[in-house]
Amino acid sequence: MQYRYVTKDKLKVSLLGLGCMRFPIIDNNPALIDRDKAFEILSYGFENGINYFDTAYPYHGGKSEGLVGDFFENIDRNKFYLATKSPVWLLESKDDFMKYLNEQLVNLKTNYVDFYLLHSLSKRTFDKIREFNFKEFIEKAKNEEKIKYIGFSFHDEYEVFEEIIDSYPWDFCQIQLNYMDKDYQAGLRGLSYAKSKGIDVIIMEPLKGGKLASAPEEILEIWDQARVKRTPPEWALKYLYSLEGIATVLSGMSTLEQIKENIELTSKEDILEKEDFDLVDRAEKIYKSRIKVGCTSCNYCMPCPSGVRIPNVFELYNNKSVYGSAYESRKSYKNLIDGKEDASSCIECGLCEEACPQNLPIISFLKDAHGDLI
């Protein structure tokens, strides 16, 4: 296992962290974790060098924190780092910051959280926590030794990321980044900006929710041209390991085989060379050439008067085409159908097309997407 030195205190943290939101489940119920298999994954990770474990209040229907707490209950607290997140969207007053933290400490069976994040900050939620004086909460929680290091996870446009970074002397932050999301949300610009501020960066979605764990034949042909042969997951992880400013890369590993593979490849200290980065760029271009709809999820088309979740429909349509994720895309689309939020609810009023800054023929694309996803 490789390690990086994180925060001003130079904590020795494993380069690969275990994200605790994709444990094996029973009967397709996210809240019904297969405890034995989850413990097996946690045990293998811990025994083979992973010391950073990331969970959150809502993961697995609120059951992830409790399972993680059960696993670590009798393990030396100095041998691992726990990260969890404040569910800021649930706050109704500033007192709720501490209410949820105290509940999380009980769930995790610990007196303190090493890395505490304000979860999924966006412009809307950031304005909310400012109204509730998040700085006062942070200082109180640190003074009471309930949290050691404070950060945030992020989901919004880059400009909002800068605003949040500049608002407080954070210890770390967490962003989504992979070789397909270089310019998505915080992206590579955010990584660089945080680094310039001396803020450590934790990476989530390195495999883009598993989409980069396998590859179509034309992408495999690109990987075959490399001097060092790597699997698709290895290309995704090594891309991140080769960037400056990354402290830890989180992977939500659902099987023992996945965690074994990721630990093995993380133990190899090779990084991508210039010619490897060129291959990554070529792979990215091929993937992007498969995009069906150039929707940027700006949401100018929303809300749809008929309830169609237009950007979500296009995301699923694109994912099926780009990554070959037919089963997952159709399963998610079925949920939209059940909620009457799918493309078949479109009444062709045209308001979305009038609002679209890219002048996309949305009505036509919705029909195409529906035909492909049902």
Image (cartoon, rainbow, N blue to C red):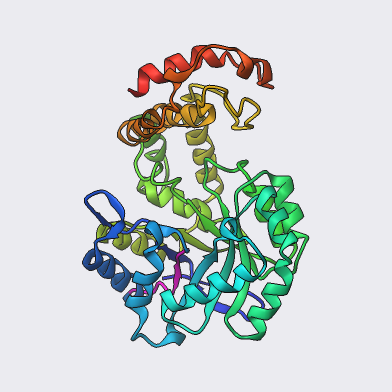
Q: Position of residue 238 (x, y in %)?
A: 47, 54
Q: Quadrant of residue 304?
A: top right
- Magenta stretch, main secondary structure, is loop
Q: Position of residue 350 (x, y in %)?
A: 60, 12
Tell me if residue 360 comes above or below residue 11 in the rendering: above
- Based on the picture, tell me whether residue 182 belongs to the magenta stretch: no
Q: Position of residue 301 (x, y in %)?
A: 62, 25
Q: Quadrant of residue 217?
A: top left
User: Which region of the structure is painted magenta?
Assistant: 48-56
Q: Of 103 and 108, which appears nearest the observer?
A: 103
Residue at screen point 50% across, 55% down? 204
Q: Is residue 314 visible?
A: yes
The answer to whether residue 230 is left or right of residue 286 is: left
Q: Is residue 173 visible?
A: no
Q: Residue furthest front?
A: 92
In which quadrant is the C terminus drawn? top left
Q: Position of residue 224 (x, y in %)?
A: 37, 39
- Based on the picture, tell me whether residue 50 belongs to the magenta stretch: yes
Residue at screen point 69% across, 48% down? 123
Q: Of 103 and 212, which appears nearest the observer?
A: 103
Q: Of 28 and 274, which appears nearest the observer?
A: 28
The answer to whether residue 75 is left or right of residue 84 is: left
Tell me if residue 304 comes above or below residue 261 in the rendering: above
